[in-house]
Amino acid sequence: MEVLRARDLARAELTRQITDTARRQLATAGAQGLSLRAVAREMGLASSALYRYFSSRDHLLTALIIDAYNAIGETAERVDTAERGAGAGVGSRWLAVCRAVRGWALDHQHEFALVYGSPVVGYRAPSDTVGPATRTARVLADILATAIAEGVLRPPDRPIPEPRLVTREVRALAGEAPEAPYEDVPERAMVLLTNLVGAINFELFGHLHNTVTDYDRYFDAVIMMTAAIAGLDVPLEPAMTQESATRSARSGLQ
């Protein structure tokens, strides 16, 4: 029994070393250039040894994608739990979670780009990635559901007409179907999520260079304005300081 446990621990440790090495290679070769041979070479191992842990480049890529989605989702969940514990309102919770996702992205630029950047040519994500990919969306959906329950989410001035614009799977993230006049909340949530990811990607890929004067305050303003469009009021507290991460993002991904 002890021998099996030792083997399991050794396998888990080597798996971690492989994925850590692969993450470093994302920064130099990008997801498209990731290869098991290059990872093995950097680790000083025979490539055949890695195939006992990851059967292909795509298998390794899937592991990195799942890890990234889980890390982003865990960040969002942890921050929202802390905000709720402190008695924060839904608008403050929304801003805190969005700031936390951005903070993670600025600290892990290449991993964020892996899951929210350009698709890897020839790679098709398996169903294993779906659960981790929805963790952040579930946090945001819960905040909107709370806003409805507390009566602080404004009904739409111009509801989205039928037919619904998101799939049943997306609507299921919100739990029970929202009742009138909130039937279009899943669509509104998608707008907010895509604006969040878009604002972060614009910053990461250098599209805000020589465009805005304060990256932190600009991000907060984007979140406030898009939330207002969806009927959620977000109070703008002082922006969190992310100077070092922001400076590195301003030049775009290297």
Image (cartoon, helix red, strand yellow):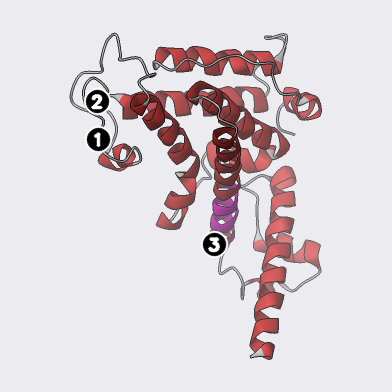
Mark 1 or 3, nearer chain start: 3
Provide residue 209's location: percent of width, then percent of height: 71, 15
The residue under label 3 is 59
Query: At numbered mark 3, what does the secondary structure look like: helix, strand or loop?
Result: helix
Provide residue 217's location: percent of width, then percent of height: 67, 14
Q: Is residue 227 left or right of residue 107?
A: left
The residue under label 2 is 183
Report, in whole angstroms, how far the alpha carbon at label 3 lies from the one at label 2. Answer: 39 Å
Tell me what residue is drawn at x 65 percent, y 79 percent: 8
Rendered position, 188 above or below 46 = above
Disc number placed over residue 39 in the picture, else none: none
Secondary structure mostly seen in the magenta stretch: helix
Rendered position, 229 above or below 81 = above
Looking at the image, do the residues carrying marks 2 and 1 touch, with CB atoms under 8 Å apart?
Answer: yes
Residue 238: quadrant of the picture:
top right
Rendered position, 102 above or below 159 = below
Provide residue 43's location: percent of width, then percent of height: 79, 65
Report, in whole angstroms, how far the alpha carbon at label 1 lies from the one at label 3. Answer: 36 Å
Disc number placed over residue 177 in the picture, else none: 1
Amino acid type, label 2:
Glu
Amino acid type, label 1:
Ala
Mark 2 or 1, nearer chain start: 1
Q: Is residue 81 left or right of residue 20?
A: left
Q: Is residue 223 left or right of residue 33?
A: left
Looking at the image, do the residues carrying marks 1 and 3 touch, with CB atoms under 8 Å apart?
Answer: no
